[in-house]
Amino acid sequence: MSKIDGDIFKLEEQLKKVKSKLADLNNAKREEEKKILLRKQMIVGKMVIDEMHKSEEFHTKTLTKLSKILTRKIDRELFSIDSCEVKLSDEISQINKPFTEGSKDPFI
């Protein structure tokens, strides 16, 4: 092996290490961004739930919007929304249990 071949081999090994480290750093950055987004979603969710406790109108509007966008049965069950089609005339009837003051979970 000539000196040039040896230098090329060393540089290729260094390049592999640098690429690996770069991939690790990019993965760590993505994970950090996911954690930040999840934290923001939790804060906004808490704010929405708090507002649902304060206002029956907001509670009804929120569940009505959810009933329009949630398509998976498991998601609809999470919010106690019937799985049948929602019609504009009977949106409120799709909510299984109405808002009650003082309940901890406004979706129950």
Image (cartoon, rainbow, N blue to C red):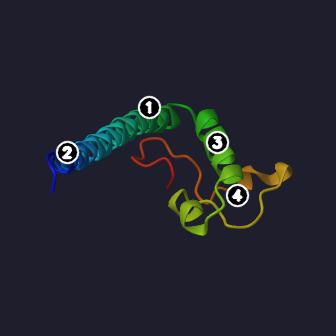
Residue 60: mark in rendering = 3
Disc 1: CA contacts within 10 A as few (<14), some (14-19) or many (>=20): few
Q: Residue 25 at x, y = what percent?
A: 26, 40
Q: Give the residue number, with chain letter if any, for mark 4.
A: 94
Badge 2 marks a residue whose secondary structure is helix
Q: Give the residue number, with chain letter if any, for mark 2.
A: 4
Upstream in sequence: badge 2 or badge 1: 2
Most foreground residue, 93 or 67: 67
Q: Residue 38 at x, y = what percent?
A: 38, 41
Q: Which amino acid does label 4 sit on?
A: Gln
Disc 4: CA contacts within 10 A as few (<14), some (14-19) or many (>=20): some
Give the CA separation, mark 3 to mark 2. Answer: 74 Å
Contact flag, marks 3 and 4 (Cβ < 8 Å): no
Q: Give the residue number, with chain letter if any, for mark 1.
A: 47
Contact flag, marks 4 and 2 (Cβ < 8 Å): no
Upstream in sequence: badge 3 or badge 4: 3
Badge 4 marks a residue whose secondary structure is helix
Upstream in sequence: badge 4 or badge 1: 1
